[in-house]
Image (cartoon, rainbow, N blue to C red):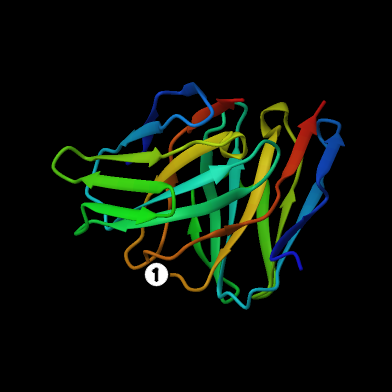
Amino acid sequence: DTAVSQTPKYLVTQMGNDKSIKCEQNLGHDTMYWYKQDSKKFLKIMFSYNNKELIINETVPNRFSPKSPDKAHLNLHINSLELGDSAVYFCASSPQLTRGVTQYFGPGTRLTVL
Amino acid sequence: SQQGEEDPQALSIQEGENATMNCSYKTSINNLQWYRQNSGRGLVHLILIRSNEREKHSGRLRVTLDTSKKSSSLLITASRAADTASYFCATDGGVQGAQKLVFGQGTRLTINP
């Protein structure tokens, strides 16, 4: 069974389009995250949610809007896609919000904006 | 901002040799974690070391932490081809009471058969 799953795995789209990436975890975790990994492999947190509540928003353009319909799902919607949005986006989850816990990562969604 | 920086950026060794990767960070931490990323995959947690610990072992992995130097090292002994991956250190920080992991750019490890 996949613990943290993301769809789609690959996403190729034109500049200016709107797209969504979905994430689901079946671990019963309270906390979920979105990360962006750029072409140089630098991984940076974008958002975290705890029990459907936004906790961390790391200076991400408001074209990015996360939505958590329940604590097992955290989706990422991106409006007006730009070339610089091309990256691999990872969803992750952890049992709780506090420090010192392991995060479990999904397989990633490779977004290419043309 | 606080950030882990791995050194070297790339490391290539022969199977059976030991691999050592280093991580430096800038501010105080509560804990430091190491993750592995196989090509085209997500990150997998390897080991966590708390700020009051100096060394930790897990199988063929040995992690050290020197908070006075703000550095950590990951040693993989008796390397195998399957250890080929990128290795990231991640430090906690940020929002009070919340976990925000800050990752470095990773060390790309290649084990040659």
Q: Is residue B93 visible?
A: no
Q: Is residue A1 above or below residue B81?
A: below
Residue A6 x, y percent position in the rendering = 76, 56
State the quadrant of the C terminus of chain A: top right
Q: Is residue B52 visible?
A: yes
Residue A12 x, y percent position in the rendering = 85, 35
Residue A39 x, y percent position in the rendering = 62, 27
Residue at 62 percent of width and 39 percent of height: B82
Please rate how many residues cluster around mark 1, counting C-alpha atoms within 10 Å: few if below 14, some from 14 to 19, many from 20.
Answer: few
Q: Is residue A83 above or below residue A95?
A: above
Query: Which of A86 and A79 lies nearest the eye of the viewer?
Result: A86
Q: Is residue B23 left or right of residue B79?
A: left
Query: Which of A4 and B3 lies nearest the eye of the viewer?
Result: A4
Dot 1 corresponds to which residue?
Answer: A98
Residue at 22 percent of width and 49 percent of height: B28
Q: Is residue B12 left or right of residue A67?
A: left
Q: Is residue A110 above or below residue A21?
A: above
Query: Which of B46 and B81 lies nearest the eye of the viewer?
Result: B81
Kind of residue sitting beneath label 1: Thr
View extreme (left): residue: B68
Q: Is residue B89 left or right of residue B36?
A: left
Residue at 83 percent of width and 50 percent of height: A8
Residue B108 x, y percent position in the rendering = 53, 28
Residue at 23 percent of width and 44 percent of height: B27
Query: Which of B65 and B92 lies nearest the eye of the viewer?
Result: B65
Q: Is residue A34 left or right of residue A17?
A: left
Tell me the SS state at disc 1. loop
Q: Identify the subunit bearing mark 1.
A: A
